[in-house]
Image (spheres, rainbow, N blue to C red):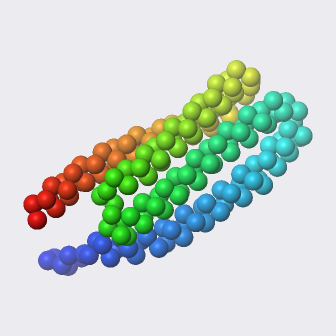
Amino acid sequence: MIEGQQVDLSNLTRLAVVPLRFFLGALFALLVMLQTFSLPGMFWHWAREDPDFEPLRWPMLLCSVVVILCAQLVIVATWRLLTMVNDDRIFSDDAFRWVDAILGAIVVAEASMAGLLVYLYLTWDDPGMGVLVMLGLLSGGAFGLLLLVMRTLLQQATELRTDLDAVI
């Protein structure tokens, strides 16, 4: 950037929204395939190949489907927030509903994984799967807390914009 020259952030943001929507749509489609075809088949195959895995088949599938449903809700809410950004309506009460929906989805996914983790440690000898679930729990928790901070920033920016609009 040349000194004294400003970048038009609104155009840059609008340019970023199109590829982001492409990636969100592709991710949503892959998650649908994963939850309807891949995971049920994979857990069935594991249980058939290793009878010791049979008690984990249904809990793992249930938890996976719940987490994927939550991820799909996050994608839909993010899509709606992107629409609000494009329409310059992000500083509104509607935005908080979508951010709260994302936070709710994170809480449900975290609760599902925590339940699975307890089940794993009570019934499974190998700690590897539990470590993977714990990694998911920690990642989801960090993302949820980050989103909570971002929600607070959105709230502060909304209040500032409301005050500014009242002055103008």
Q: Is residue 160 left or right of residue 68?
A: left
Q: At x 82% / y 49%, what residue is drawn?
A: 41
Q: Nearer the viewer, residue 158 or 126?
A: 158
Tell me which residue sits at (75%, 53%) in the image: 36
Would residue 32 be found to the left or right of residue 99 on screen? right
73 left or right of 34 in image: left
**Rendered view: 48 above or below 35:** above
Residue 24 position in % (x across, y down): 54, 63
Q: Is residue 139 visible?
A: no
Measuring 25% from the left and 54% from the top, which residue is drawn there?
158
Picture coordinates of residue 167 (x, y %)? 9, 60
Give the answer, above or below, for where 85 lies relative to 12: above
Counting from the top left corner in percent of width and height, residue 71 is at: 57, 50
- Foreground: 106 or 87? 87
Find residue 6 and report its horizontal and vertical position in percent: 20, 76
84 or 72, which lies in front?
84
Q: Is residue 84 left or right of residue 107?
A: left
